[in-house]
Amino acid sequence: MGERVIYHELAAVHHHHHPHPHQHHQQQSPHSQALFHHPQPQQRRPKQGMAAMPALASPSHVYANANGAAAWRGARQQQYYPNTISTGHGPGPTGAAAMKQLQAKQLANSEQQQQQPPVASEVSVGATDTLPTTPRSGQIKPPRNKSEEAIADLLVRIPDVGQLFDVHSRIGNGTFSTVLLATMRREANLPESLRRKFAIKHHIPTSHPDRIMKELQCMTKMGGTENVVGIHCCLRCDASAAFVMPYMPHDRFHDFYTRMDVPEIRLYMRNLLVALRHVHKFDVIHRDVKPSNFLYNRRRREFLLVDFGLAQHANPPVMGAIANPGVNYNNNNNSKRPRERETEAVQANVQADAGLGGAVKRMRLHEEGTKMPLKPVNEIAQGEAQPADGSNPSQQPTTMLQQQPQQPQQVPQQDQSTASTPASGSKYNTNRSASGASANSSKCFCFANPSVCLNCLMKKEVHASRAGTPGYRPPEVLLKYPDQTTAVDVWAAGVIFLSIMSSVYPFFKAPNDFIALAEIVTIFGDQAIRKTALALDRMITLSQRSRPLNLRKLCLRFRHRTVFSDAKLLKSHESADGRCEVCRNCDQYFFNCLCDDSEYVTEPLDAYECFPASAYDLLHRLLEVNPHKRITAAEALQHPFFTEAAEEVAEQPRKVRRQRHHKQMVTSEQQQADLELQQQTAINNKLLN
Ligand SMILES: Nc1ncnc2c1ncn2[C@@H]1O[C@H](COP(=O)(O)OP(=O)(O)OP(=O)(O)O)[C@@H](O)[C@H]1O
């Protein structure tokens, strides 16, 4: 409902301003170490360290339209090659030129306004002659800070935003976008409490159109329900695009992650898993699950999963992986990962997908790489708005991307397998010594040669996405496993849970993927990683052995670090010569040993316990190293950590009744005793008198 209303309103407002929208647009914008780095124990360091975009205006602004997309690409080419002379499509300035004009104009305005009293109540920056006129031009101010710069930039690049919205401030600044708070101009005269607030995500101009398109598709397909952010509309002008989303005021993770009690942690994790379960039903991996992308309003108990900028379709099944014995792919029907349901066509598209949106975060894609033809949004909305869990068998569930790539994949260099984790399977042909199908069977002549031999050069490249934020990448990503599934997000949810339970944020913070893998080895032991690598057909070389740590010890030890890192405690365990033994595996003082099977008598932790055993069990399952064994979001929601709590709540009235009854019993017994005492006293008094 809410979305439709906005569409109409936006359209209505637009028509109000521009009775001939198409004409108007032709004129105006024709081309237009926790354990690793975090609070360390004082004494010791560890050893290592979219959218039905209904009739917003002209087709050129609806970028799901094929022409719009083409126009956009054209515009982008100009952007990528700034020296290209503009084809003189119209007067509307774009990009840097417009910014300069705006700044010059604003400077002039500011000089004119110097004598005028400043307008304190509005942050919104108005427009210049080059922009649609705004009634508040008297409030034009030169950008004074980053927030105002961001507002000015948005209004210059996408003038329609200024027609429709009052943009107030910058609320978020990510790698690929700036997010701004806005209200509708037509609601400006309403009391503030009645004005609806919007978050406008302004994509950086160099963001690839396919990436923006895919994010839009995700939001249109899946958003607006189950804690997943929806979208009202998208505005585009030339190479710039902005998503208008519902605004959710939220708390900073930093401010609450140490302050939540168990019921609140349960609520937080449940809502995160609800969002993931929903996204995963569509066979989509979010790929960037982290606290700043899961908004939480503590007061209202509201949650929102945002930022589908890196989302990708789960990879198709791979024969080798499915044939892997002992790996359970189908834990239950509801939650089964998409691996076995993919069609060949989808597989091809997914591979294309992985090369696009699945690009490395903070890394530009190769422009000459595969281009996905943009698809009319209404087609997407009609044909794809079904989850892939079989709930609507009449529709092909996995059709997020239906076009075949036009060119062969060009994989960003960083995504390719490297010598440090070469695959040993024949499927991906990256193990230089492996014998196997086709080219793989050729002998490798690399050894002791200064160049890569022809046979190796002929081998297929491993295409494993590593998109995501460092610290939240699971072992399969770090091992460059190509067939990644929604389990990637579950691991990230586990990392968030670990941060909350251990009061360490961020928990993992490695400068590169190898150290990230070493951090995981430190906690889960080398055997778990070796076994997983084997199960995933990857080969890993580790320089040392390490036994796994105990997650409960680790969480409590860090949660209460002031206690366990206290100098007095160390003193009490020191020998007469002032020495104290250190565990050679976890590198902690023996009394703080974190090893799972510790040989030391350690400081008791029970007094500091604040979590039920089920919390640690869930933590273990979310952070299962082997992605094929990792719990799914749907399964996790059935975990005792959540269900037992529900039973407890359901049982509460009975418990309370029992307690009350007990209290009544105690009271009546007490009263009876008191009465007897009084009677006895009276008898005694009588006798005495
Ligand atoms: N609907 C919303 N309501 C309120 N705030 C939002 C909303 N969407 C995003 N934000 C804020 O903007 C920030 C950045 O948004 P988003 O993650 O979508 O951008 P990004 O450029 O992809 O960021 P990053 O590179 O950090 O992932 C969020 O962390 C959040 O604080």
Image: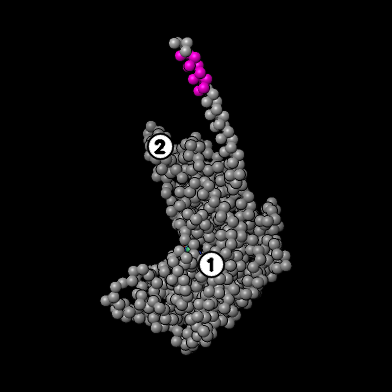
Q: Check disc 2 and give the amino acid type.
A: Leu
Q: Position of residue 514 (x, y in %)?
A: 51, 57
Magenta stretch contains residue 75: no
- Determine the residue located farthest toward the top in the rendered image: 688
Q: Residue at x 63, y 57 (%)?
A: 536
Label 1 vs label 2: CA separation?
48 Å
Q: Is the C-beta of the residue carrying label 1 under 8 Å from the nearest atom of ligand 1?
A: yes
**Circle number at residue 569:** 2
> Which of pointers 1 and 2 lies earlier in the amino acid sequence?
1
Q: Residue at x 42, y 49 (%)?
A: 39
Q: Quadrant of the C terminus?
A: top left
Q: Is residue 183 visible?
A: yes
Q: Is the C-beta of the residue carrying label 2 under 8 Å from the nearest atom of ligand 1?
A: no
Q: Is disc 2 placed on a helix, strand or loop?
A: helix
Q: Check disc 1 and give the amino acid type.
A: Gly
Quadrant in the rendering for residue 392: bottom right
Labelled pair 1, 2 in contact (Cβ < 8 Å) = no
Boundaries of the magenta span: 674-685
In the picture shown, does residue 230 fall above or below 601?
below
Q: Residue at x 63, y 72 (%)?
A: 380
Instruction: Say few, some or many: other residues with alpha carbon within 10 Å of mark 1 (under 14 / 14 to 19 / 20 or more).
Output: many
